[in-house]
Image (cartoon, grey):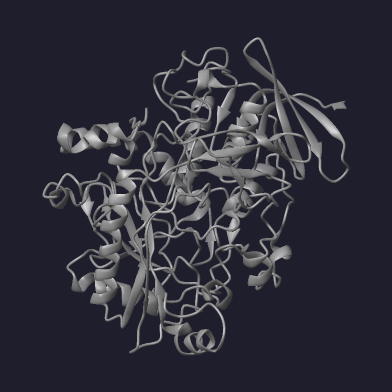
């Protein structure tokens, strides 16, 4: 086993979380190494091979197998968990390589969910949450704390949109486009989002007919030739339909690999080691001293010493690595895992073609009228049996490649045979399926731990996920399902179907919690900067930090938290000897 020269910073996992901190600290002169389990795919690896839905979506070439990265799931504590497929990319850039590009700032109230619902609703209305074991905590940081770093993400990573609120002025640029519910921003997006297509226009028509407030979602895809503040040049989107689950062939979809990696490498202080699988963190006397990792190409094992360690892998793997290394955070590591489950709504239109096979998935209109507590007046009128807190974003997804649409059929249509073929011959280009992003809550019985029954080929136990759909998710699903049906019917759909029942699963790409930040070590794993209470020279990145989620996608917030933590290091706000000595 080779012991390598010590580095100032060792980053474990190089996805959305690892990108900003690699740039900021290497620019400041720190010696930084990133250990990424996946291979380093460049634009040449995706063009023209990106145009292959069978390869990337059906066969999931970027996603590790169950043997490589085992994951198990159970919804009942008394059951044995069973293996489930991993769905996140294992590559340099992580899931930001194959994501859709839908990029949001969280609401101001998303950082204070506990306080918000207690201010708006009575103890009688909220009593069911205690029955279900909900453990809701405010974030130890606010939207105002993060706003400068959201802006930095949008300009350095590259996010386009129509502003809904600039310095308190609502929808100042175009009254038909901005999101009137968004938190105030200090300045506009660096460029505009993707244009609308037939699916978006149809969704917008239905929403406007109901008096709602549709807008084009912000998208981390360059719609024009763009150079970020560090001089990284990017090409404009070509509007190909091979986007979500694919790597972008010309680098217009913003990801850590194309937006941030070039800047880190240009400093001369940063080293990226792909195909490097970290096994454990070695720690002595309350401090991490090194990590052991295997070179997946040569099979050799190495030890990489460091002064500071940053966990930039996906939520499951960050938790798994800490637990396997014997770092439990007094029982807080792995607790309060949150991911989405919710309804589904689909429709067919007889009077128009929607041509979903005509552009990226985030060529999308959406609305936030039912997100967060934006519909508080309606909720206050609900019966106690129907009442719920929080809500959902509703949007109009595109990118309906044939292999991604073959299962979208009404219940009366068989899954094979002549009737199946006739249905898709007639309706493949007449179909729309809504995106319904419900906000889940953290519960005492939702967590990640190590599975005693399954290991990977190196003998490391699988991450085991325990998650259930409780009363809040069930009630919300019924409500949001009906709202989705109403929107599509108002748009003129001939046939609408779906399900109003949430089905919990181990993973659905928005998988947060497990290492939540907080102000109290007995209720959280890290402090407000992502510094582990138990081992102060380990910093945590990624969605695992989140105390609560949102009705919006988390990726922009993950980049932003990485900038937030980087600034804390550079401004001397952290003491790597004492996690409680921070400013």
Q: Quadrant of the C terminus?
A: top left
Q: From what the image shows, is residue 48 above or below residue 173?
A: below
Q: From what the image shows, is residue 536 above or below residue 316?
A: above
Q: Residue furthest left?
A: 381
State whether residue 205 appears in this view: no
Of residues 328 and 102, the one drawn nearer to the viewer in this rendering: 328
In this image, 154 relative to 291: left or right?
left
Q: Position of residue 450 (x, y in %)?
A: 62, 32
Q: Quadrant of the N terminus?
A: top right
In this image, 436 relative to 423: left or right?
left
Q: Position of residue 2 (x, y in %)?
A: 87, 27
Q: From what the image shows, is residue 335 above or below residue 286?
A: below
Residue at image x 62%, y 49%?
A: 94
Residue at image x 41%, y 83%?
A: 430
Res. 368 image quadrant: bottom left
In this image, 524 relative to 267: left or right?
left
State whether residue 521 appears in this view: yes
Q: Residue furthest top?
A: 285
Of residues 403 and 185, the one drawn nearer to the viewer in this rendering: 403
Q: How many marks?
A: 0
Q: Position of residue 25 (x, y in %)?
A: 60, 32
Q: Position of residue 261 (x, y in %)?
A: 64, 47
Residue at image x 69%, y 66%?
A: 46
Q: From what the image shows, is residue 386 above or below residue 22?
A: below
Of residues 124 and 564, the one drawn nearer to the viewer in this rendering: 124
């Amino acid at each position: 086993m080779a012991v390598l020269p010590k580095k100032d910073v060792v980053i474990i996992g190089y996805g959305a979380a690892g990108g900003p901190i690699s740039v900021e600290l290497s620019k400041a002169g720190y010696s930084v190494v990133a250990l990424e389990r996946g291979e380093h795919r460049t634009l040449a690896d995706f063009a023209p091979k990106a145009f292959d839905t069978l390869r990337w979506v059906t066969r999931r070439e970027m996603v590790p197998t169950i043997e490589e990265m085992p994951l198990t799931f159970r919804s009942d504590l008394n059951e044995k968990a069973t293996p489930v497929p991993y769905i996140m990319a294992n590559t340099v850039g992580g899931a930001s390589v194959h994501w859709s590009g839908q990029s949001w700032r969280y609401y101001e109230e998303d950082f204070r969910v506990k306080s918000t619902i207690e201010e708006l609703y009575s103890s009688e209305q909220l009593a069911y949450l205690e029955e279900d074991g909900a453990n809701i905590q405010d974030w130890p940081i606010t939207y105002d704390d993060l706003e400068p770093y959201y802006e930095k993400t949008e300009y350095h990573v590259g996010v386009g949109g129509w502003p809904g609120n600039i310095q308190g002025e609502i929808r100042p640029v175009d009254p038909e486009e901005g999101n009137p519910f968004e938190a105030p921003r200090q300045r506009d997006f660096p460029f505009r989002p993707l244009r609308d297509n037939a699916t978006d226009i149809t969704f917008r028509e239905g929403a406007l007919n109901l008096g709602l407030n549709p807008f084009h979602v912000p998208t981390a895809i360059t719609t024009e030739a763009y150079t970020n503040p560090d001089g990284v040049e990017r090409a404009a989107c070509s509007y190909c339909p091979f986007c979500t689950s694919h790597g972008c062939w010309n680098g217009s979809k913003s990801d850590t690999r194309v937006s941030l990696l070039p800047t880190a490498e240009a400093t001369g202080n940063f080293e990226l080691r792909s195909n490097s699988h970290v096994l454990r963190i070695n720690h002595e006397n309350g401090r991490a001293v090194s990590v052991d990792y295997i070179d997946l190409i040569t099979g050799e094992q190495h030890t990489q010493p460091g002064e500071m360690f940053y966990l930039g892998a996906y939520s499951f793997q960050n938790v798994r690595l800490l637990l396997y290394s014997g770092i439990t955070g007094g029982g807080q590591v792995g607790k309060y895992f949150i991911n989405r489950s919710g309804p589904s709504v689909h429709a067919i239109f007889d009077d128009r073609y929607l041509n979903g096979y005509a552009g990226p998935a985030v060529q999308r209109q959406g609305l936030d009228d039912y997100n967060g507590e934006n519909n508080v007046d309606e909720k206050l009128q609900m019966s106690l049996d129907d009442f719920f807190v929080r809500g959902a974003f509703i949007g109009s997804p595109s990118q309906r490649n044939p292999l991604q649409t073959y299962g979208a059929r009404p219940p009366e249509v068989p899954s094979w045979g002549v009737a199946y073929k006739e249905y898709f011959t007639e309706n493949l280009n007449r179909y729309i399926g809504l995106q319904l992003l419900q906000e889940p809550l953290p519960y005492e019985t939702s967590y990640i731990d190590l599975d005693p029954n399954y290991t990977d080929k190196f003998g490391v136990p699988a991450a085991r996920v325990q998650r259930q759909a409780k009363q809040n998710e069930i009630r919300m699903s019924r409500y949001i399902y009906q709202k989705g049906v109403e929107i599509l019917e108002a748009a003129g759909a001939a046939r609408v179907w779906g399900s109003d029942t949430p089905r919990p699963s181990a993973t659905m790409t928005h998988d947060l919690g497990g290492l939540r930040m907080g102000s109290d070590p007995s209720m959280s794993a890290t402090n407000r900067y992502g510094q582990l209470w138990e081992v102060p020279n380990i910093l945590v990145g990624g969605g695992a930090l989140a105390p609560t989620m949102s009705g919006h996608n988390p990726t922009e917030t993950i980049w932003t938290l990485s900038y937030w933590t980087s600034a804390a290091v550079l401004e001397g706000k952290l003491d790597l000897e004492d996690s409680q000595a921070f400013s």
